[in-house]
Each structure stands twice: as C-alpha cells, then as structure tokens.
Image (spheres, rainbow, N blue to C red):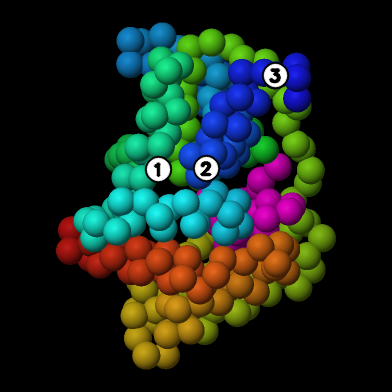
Amino acid sequence: MSEVPEFSLLCATAAGAGLACRGAFHPEASDDVPPLRDGVPTATLVLFGFVRGEQWPAFTRSNEFADRQPGPLDRWSRRLIDALGAPLGARGLYPSDGPPWLPFQRWATKAEAVHVSPLGLLVHPDWGLWHSYRGALALRERWQLPAVDRRPSPCDECAAQPCLSTCPVDAVQPQRFNHRSCALHVGSDDGSDCLHAGCRARRSCPVGQRHRYGDHQAEFHMRAFLRGAEDGERR
C-alpha cells in the first residue's frame, strides 16, 4: 500500500492502539458527513472498529473496562480515536453521538464490502456478522485511498437464511426487529443462552462462523443491549 502512505500509517497506528481500520472514502454532500469543527468540509472519512474478536483484549485491558462507570466501550473508543485524530487536526465522529444519529451503516457500505443483512446488521464476506464500527475521523485533506472492496453480499447466495427462523420469540423478521420481545426474552431464564453466548439469530449465520465472539465479549454486548432497552422503557 505504498501509494497510500498516510492511510497506511494511520491504520498501523490504530492497530497498535487496539482498533482496526474499517475502510475510508471521499464524502459527497449526500453522505451527510459533518464538517470539521471550523466549518471546513470533510474531504476524507476513515472508519474504525472491531473485526472478529481481535480488538477485544485491548479493550479489556483498559481503565474504562475496569472502572465500572457507564459506557466503557464508547468512552474507550472515543479516547483512542480522538488521540489518533489530534495530530491530524481531524474531528472524531461516533455512533453514540445523537440524536440525531450519524448514518454509520450507510458510510460503512461506501468504505468496504459490507451489506445490510436480513437481520438489519451489516454482514461482511469474511467476518460475517462478527464486526462493529466504533467511530470515524473526518479529515480536511483528500488522502489517496486504496480501492474499495466491492464484493457482493454473502446473503445473496444464502437460500436458507437461518437468521430469520432461529429466534425463539420471533423478534427478528425481514426489515423488522422487535426490541421489546428480544429484551424480555434475553432478560428471562429462558433467554440465558442468548444472554451468555450472544443472539441465537446472529449465531445462526453461516458466514464467518470461525470469527464468532467469545462468550465474554458476547455477554458484554448483550448486557449493554439490555441496559439500552431498559433506558428506552424509562423514557
């Protein structure tokens, strides 16, 4: 990747800190990418996140993971991405900012080979459903970037689509997710499998099975989902 030295260096620095580069693109007005804080339009947007369980150990070694304060993963992600952006004069953007929420799923489909699955989650040809986006850096310079991976969705060749028939409470339907039914099940005795090992529908996807999260990581995310559902009920 010698033809894209700035991007390569940023990705290497991010990997050393515990985050994966998740692609990049040059935004257009229709992409709804915010400008930098001084009003200059964003010329390059670089996304960061997790792939499989690779970055999980770095997070579990962090102060945020240990301090028992709310939102440890969001706080850890923000600290790392802000630090990556500081020398570049970049602006950090985060999925947790909002409302209004930033269109990270739409940005991701422009940056790499991810597609909306029947579950509504983004599926990757290699990682399957076992990946996430933790934030992005908005840059004022138009960097040279590697060609975007444009492989098709693996769901196109999945006739069985077990992700739509595995949920024990039918919370998952095409283009619809019943948050309340899911949360009630996961929080019950009958839902202990989903709580401790992760969503059954997600686990049923045949793509990237070897990259599935370990139980510790899966339970962390499921408990975060339950807390979010509880907060939503109180509003």
Inspect this view and state whether residue 13 appears: yes
Whether 115 is among the magenta residues is yes
Bin the neighbour count of mark 3 within 10 Å (Cα to Cα): few under 14, some 14-19, many 20 and up. few
Task: Name the amino acid type tagged 3.
Answer: Val
Q: Quadrant of residue 207?
A: bottom right
The numbered disc on residue 4 is: 3
Task: Indicate the amino acid at tag 2.
Answer: Leu
187 relative position to 216: left or right: left
Q: What element carries label 1?
A: helix
| Residues in magenta, as a range | 113-132
Q: Which residue matches tag 1? A: 77
The residue furthest left is 234
SS at mark 3 in the image: loop
Depth order, front residue of 35/235:
35
Mark 2 and mark 3 lie on one chain; the one further toward the N terminus is 3
Please report the residue visible at 45 percent of the width from the left and 28 percent of the height from the top: 84
Residue 4 position (above or below residue 101): above
The residue under label 2 is 19
Q: Would you say the residues marked 1 and 2 are in contact, meaning their CB atoms lie under 8 Å apart?
A: yes
Magenta part, dominant SS: loop
Which x, y percent locates residue 173? Answer: 55, 69
Report whether 140 appears left or right of 212.
left
Of callouts 1 and 2, which one flags the residue occurring earlier in the amino acid sequence?
2
